[in-house]
Image (spheres, rainbow, N blue to C red):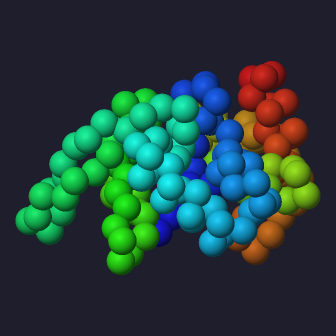
Amino acid sequence: MSAPAWLRCPEPHAGQDPDAIRRLSGHGFDPAVASEVVAALISEGRCPACPALGLEPSVLSLYGREVPVGRCQCCRAAWRVDAGEGWEALELGRLVAAPPEMGGQRLYGLTELAGAAGISPNLAKQWQHRGKLPPPDAMLAMGPVWLGETVERWLRER
């Protein structure tokens, strides 16, 4: 099960906030509570990524079986709640990964920076080698890391 608190809709509306599920739970980020909130939203016919919007009934073919789902008309994600398995995002539609946060600051790796810039990770890697990306704020074994303010400034200025 993927965590919708880390997914966001690419459209600029209230459901875009990656912390929406955390706030809706009213308990900070507690995975058990957040999962219950997601299940409740889906059961109410609302999209966890776009909580203000309703889910339209739809059907997906899954392993040769027709599975009833709710599909968000904004982000196109397909959600279902199964009493035995909890909730599932069966199709992510147009949802995108939101960068992780640390101490309130968003962090970007090369893939997250590429997504924010609307380019492929391969092109971002080429740009990094050519000096077209801002210098990373840190280097880890997994690669370069940028602070959100660095990436946001670079996106505005490029």
The quarter of the displayed image where residue 144 is located: bottom right
Residue that appears at 87% across and 39% down: 149
The quarter of the displayed image where residue 76 is located: top left
Residue that appears at 76% across and 74% down: 141
Q: Report the side of 118 relative to 33 (left or right).
A: left
Residue 13 appearing in the image: yes
Q: Position of residue 81 (x, y in %)?
A: 37, 61
Q: Position of residue 41 (x, y in %)?
A: 50, 49
Which residue appears farthest toward the top when viewing the image? 157
Front-lying residue, 41 or 7: 41
Say if 114 sits above or below 108 in the image: above
Q: How many marks?
A: 0
The quarter of the displayed image where residue 131 is located: top right
Residue that appears at 11% across and 64% down: 65
Residue that appears at 43% across and 30% down: 74
Say if 157 sits above or below 69 in the image: above
Which residue appears farthest toward the left when viewing the image? 64
Front-lying residue, 25 or 107: 25
Residue 124 appearing in the image: no
Say if 7 sits above or below 17 in the image: below
Q: Report the side of 51 relative to 106 (left or right).
A: left
Front-lying residue, 20 or 93: 20
